[in-house]
Image (tube, rainbow, N blue to C red):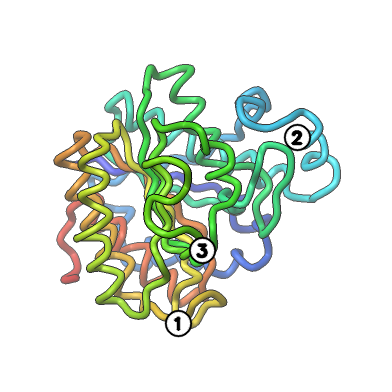
């Protein structure tokens, strides 16, 4: 039986970056309302705060001090980082098969010494460097379905061909980022196009790359009711998770961490979150 971990702390929605609050609350309420948490192969972990030394694997001390003292999002950042780091560790050591992490701040606009757009620290980059230092892991794949360009993540890993980063922001043409491992596809216009690109383009690239773990990053601002491209319906996101999960099963033993940022209306997240977790845990509760 697949073991799926959910990593959550109420600080990650009560003290979240303000545009994320309703979505994060809706996402967790969706899990409760649909009785997902009562499934025997679902394990709820209370996210713990990260250690500052982990953040320093990626970020400068000046930037760490600035976030701590000037932004008001230090505590939420610590618990969001703590969630993804613990999820990464538990997946890589085999305690669980995959994970779903609630994060109250973004990550992909965070550079080493500055950030913007609701991001303060690069959550995924910190988890990757933690895994390299402590878990003997080398190759990582990230699939980001957010509207916007991940300028922070691609900057941090621009010369690192052991980190595959795929997004749909249209910033670069395919494989034009100075290497083969940073790929920005164009925005999609509907669910069908998005799913086609995942199946026909993204999954083969991940298979060729052969990562040891996959991260699937859910910024939901592509949703029709959100503030990004407004092209995608709520039905698309769980289907993406199912496809990526099935592919991860084949290429890296199912090691998959899903990051959930909640940047869509509460009702969207209430629909999406339980269906993604259903796909991860193979509960079969929904027809997608």
Front residue of this view, candidates 258 and 1: 258
Kindly identify the residue that appears in the image at 68 percent across and 27 percent down: 52
C-alpha gap between disc 1 and disc 3: 14 Å
Is 250 located above or below residue 284 in the figure?
above
Asked if residue 25 shows in the view, the reply is: no
Viewport quadrant of the N terminus: top left
Q: Which residue is mark 3?
A: 262
| Residue 247 screen position, x and y as percent | 19, 48
Residue 68 lies left or right of residue 281; in this view the side is: right
| Residue 277 screen position, x and y as percent | 30, 56
Q: Check if mark 1's residue and mark 3's residue have beta carbons within 8 Å.
A: no
Residue 192 lies left or right of residue 47; in this view the side is: left
Crowd rating for badge 1 (residues with CA inside 10 Å; few <14, some 14–19, many 20+): some
Q: Quadrant of residue 199?
A: bottom left
N-term-proximal mark, 2 vs 1: 2
Kindly identify the residue that appears in the image at 41 percent across and 36 percent down: 163
Q: Could you say which disc has been placed on residue 64 in the image?
A: 2
| Residue 254 screen position, x and y as percent | 22, 39
| Residue at the farthest right position | 70
Viewport quadrant of the C terminus: bottom left
Helix, strand or loop at label 2? It is: helix
Q: Which residue is mark 1?
A: 224
Helix, strand or loop at label 3? It is: loop
């Amino acid at each position: 039986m697949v073991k799926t971990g959910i990593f959550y702390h109420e600080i990650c929605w009560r003290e979240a970056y303000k545009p994320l609050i309703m979505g994060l609350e809706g996402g967790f309420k969706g899990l409760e309302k649909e009785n997902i948490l009562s499934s025997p192969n679902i394990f709820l972990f209370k996210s713990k705060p990260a250690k500052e030394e982990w953040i320093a694997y990626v970020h400068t001390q000046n930037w760490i001090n600035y976030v701590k003292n000037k932004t008001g999002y230090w505590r939420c950042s610590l618990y969001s980082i703590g969630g993804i780091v613990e999820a990464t560790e538990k997946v890589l050591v085999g305690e669980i098969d995959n994970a779903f992490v609630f994060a109250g701040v973004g990550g992909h606009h965070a550079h080493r010494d500055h950030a913007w757009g609701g991001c303060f620290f690069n959550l995924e980059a910190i988890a990757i460097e933690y895994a390299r230092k402590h878990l003997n892991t080398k190759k990582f794949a990230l699939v980001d379905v957010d509207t916007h360009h991940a300028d922070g993540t691609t900057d941090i890993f621009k010369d690192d061909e052991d980190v595959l980063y795929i997004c749909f922001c249209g910033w670069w043409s395919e494989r034009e980022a100075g290497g083969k491992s940073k790929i920005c596809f164009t925005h999609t216009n509907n669910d069908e196009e998005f799913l086609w690109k995942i199946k026909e383009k993204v999954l083969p690239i991940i298979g060729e790359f052969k990562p040891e773990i996959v991260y699937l990053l859910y910024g939901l601002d592509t949703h029709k009711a959100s503030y990004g491209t407004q092209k995608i319906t709520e039905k698309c996101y769980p289907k993406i998770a199912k496809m990526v999960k099935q592919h991860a099963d084949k290429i890296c033993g199912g090691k998959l961490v899903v990051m959930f940022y909640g940047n869509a209306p509460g009702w969207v997240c209430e629909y999406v979150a339980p269906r993604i977790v259903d796909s991860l845990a193979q509960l079969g509760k929904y027809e997608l």
